[in-house]
Amino acid sequence: MLSQPLFNHQNPVINVSDYGYTIDGDYVELRAFIQTVDSDITPVSLQLWASTEPYEQGVLTGVKIAELDCGCLSPTTVIKETVAAAFPAGQSAYYVYLVVTDGVHVLSCLPFTQMEHFVQPTLIGQLTTTVTENAVSVHIEQILNPRDADNLSGTLVLELWSLSDAYQGGAFNGVSLGSVILGTLAGQSSWYANTCSFALDTHTATREHVVLMLREWTGQGYLTRDFREVNLASPAITQEPIVDAVPEEVVQVAVSSPAKRTVTRRAAVKPSTNTSKPSINQVVEAQLAAEKGVSKQVVANILAARPFKKWEEIAKLKGVGEKVLAKLKASFSLE
């Protein structure tokens, strides 16, 4: 069971055909042709869900990937819009469903015939922890970007979180115990023998669920791509990957289902043409603050105003003079 329960399925008053979705980076295009015979139907939304379990009847559990507010339906409604997406973290294979809901009931639940394996940066191999009185050292065998070779990741970070509930790959609430910036990673490339340390305190020891997350910077901020539970109960622990068995019929790169239910996949992140400098549109606050002569206020102004397409846009920000702009140009790109 994943992060959110879907509502009980009701007898549909609508008919949905010609439906599908197209993944483009961290966005997804939702498509559907909806007909209704109920003129009193309340406003509805079109949602894309992922679940590790097949849906037959009753309650469908899973992670909501995306949602589009459709308002009140007319007798015939054609939908084709792109919205932000938040894919489930981890390496599991998922059943995917397109759902029409009024916020209380599922009016239509439309399955896709093939399972989906979301291609995103991942933790590979065993995770070993060494716990001392004041710190935990985490060793990861491999961090892989499985996307196409020309597909540079966003800035990757490892974050250690203390959670009150077991993490299932969706939204979460907890206390951050620290983070380590790793940088960007080219597609089909890996970092090996990764070791990082995090401080521990009495608060950490009282938390039941400690989770290491691999997160990636996107246009929506940081999104969790993979995760492992960290056991602090003994001095040295080895954690196996959290991954479900992947059936043979799972499509990992491109998914296509029968006609009028086409599912396509595009590159997950557009590659940078300048890999020598990190993008000012992707770097985290600490990277900007590390630049000498760049004040905290300027950093805040940059974070609030990005993304930028031209350096002239940055030059107009309060506190950015010729010298500061020159420093930024020397250290960062606009890709």
Image (cartoon, rainbow, N blue to C red):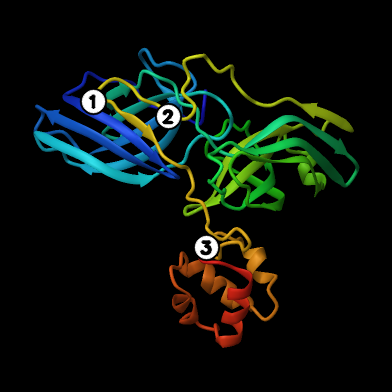
What is the C-alpha distance between the residues marked 1 and 3? 37 Å
Q: Secondary structure at mark 1?
A: loop
**Precedes in sequence: disc 1 or disc 3:** 1
Dot in front, 2 or 3: 2
**Precedes in sequence: disc 2 or disc 3:** 2
What is the C-alpha distance between the residues marked 2 and 3? 29 Å
Position of 260 with respect to 177 (left or right) is left
Identified by mark 2, the residue type is Ala
Identified by mark 1, the residue type is Lys
Q: Secondary structure at mark 3?
A: loop
Dot in front, 2 or 1: 2
Q: As rendered, which of 80 and 334 lies closer to the eye?
A: 334
Q: Give the number of the disc on residue 281.
A: 3
Position of 168 with respect to 268 (left or right) is right
Identified by mark 3, the residue type is Asn
Q: Position of residue 260 (x, y in %)?
A: 23, 25
* Residue under label 2: 254
* Residue under label 1: 260
> Up-down: is 25 above or below 183?
above
What is the C-alpha distance between the residues marked 2 and 1? 16 Å
Position of 37 with respect to 263 (left or right) is left
Residue 255: quarter of image: top left
How many numbered circles are shown? 3
Q: Position of residue 160 (x, y in %)?
A: 71, 44
Q: Position of residue 230 (x, y in %)?
A: 75, 34
